Image (cartoon, grey):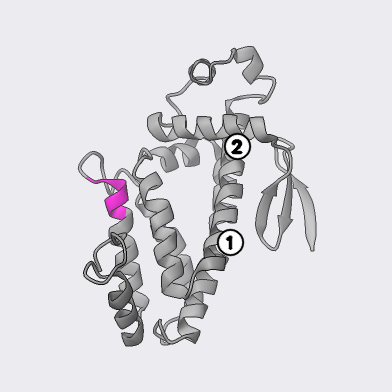
Amino acid sequence: MSKTIRTPETIPLQIVSGVYICTMFDEQQVKILKKVEELFFRFGIKSLTMDDVARELGISKKTLYQFVESKDDLVLKVMLRHIEEDCEKAKSLNSIATDAIDEIMKVVEYNAVDIGKIKSNIVFELKRFYPSAWEKMEEYNFGFMHKVVLDNLRWGVRDGLYRHDFDSEIVARMHVASVLTAFDDRIFPQPKFNLEKIFKEYMLHYLHGILSEKGKKVLLKKYSPENATKQPVFQV
């Protein structure tokens, strides 16, 4: 079952089984939004003006405003495109994963490098200055991503790779909330802490917290440096 909703900026979305699918961006617009996202990751959101964005894109500000109504609208569109891409990637990784542990390792490998490029205050800026985009991010994290994590936990428990003595719903919610903590500059000030390293350390901590004895053996067999077929995502 699907339904159409409208955001405050009247951006049409389709929500199908908890997954956001943007229906308004053509190929050229997607290229623009991906480029703007890269700029946000490098410089932060608040410090970039629309003049800066237009200059970096190599277009006039007038042309930029033919696509967006305001900077708030631009940030929201960037977020929606990012959500769509993450949803598709999560589904793709799930479809090729051999087991629950393999799915987590593929997710870490996919996200680790990009996370290392993001300014740590970007989550704070979204939350404080761009509430519409922040609302979509929270809906995504505690909707779609929560379901992805929950399904992974149940998969691992069913196969005996994860412990069976924890509440999957609670652990899934704790995990989704904890990942955002890595971007809290008050807890992990930069440049002292590297976001990519924080993410990898947290994911390793999370994984060891849920693994059964069988799961630990599978992890070491497949992903320890001496057994891995390629450079492991992180030391296990």
Q: Main secondary structure of the magenta part?
A: helix
Q: Is residue 199 above or below residue 26?
A: below
Identity of the residue drawn at 46% across and 61% down? 176
x and y, in percent, of residue 96 in the image: 53, 67
- The earlier-in-sequence mark between 1 and 2 is 2
Magenta segment boundaries in residue numbering: 193-198
Residue type at mark 2? Leu
C-alpha gap between disc 1 and disc 2: 23 Å
Identify the image quadrant of the C terminus: bottom left
Q: Along the horizontal axis of the image, is 60 left or right of 111?
A: right
Q: Is residue 187 something one can see in this rendering?
A: yes
**Residue carrying label 2:** 76
Q: Is residue 168 above or below residue 202?
A: below
Q: Along the horizontal axis of the image, is 100 left or right of 24?
A: left
x and y, in percent, of residue 128 in the image: 48, 38
Mark 2, secondary structure of its residue: helix
Q: Is residue 183 something one can see in this rendering?
A: no
Identity of the residue drawn at 50% across and 86% down? 158
As drawn, the label of residue 91 is 1
Identity of the residue drawn at 42% across and 52% down? 111
x and y, in percent, of residue 79 in the image: 57, 41
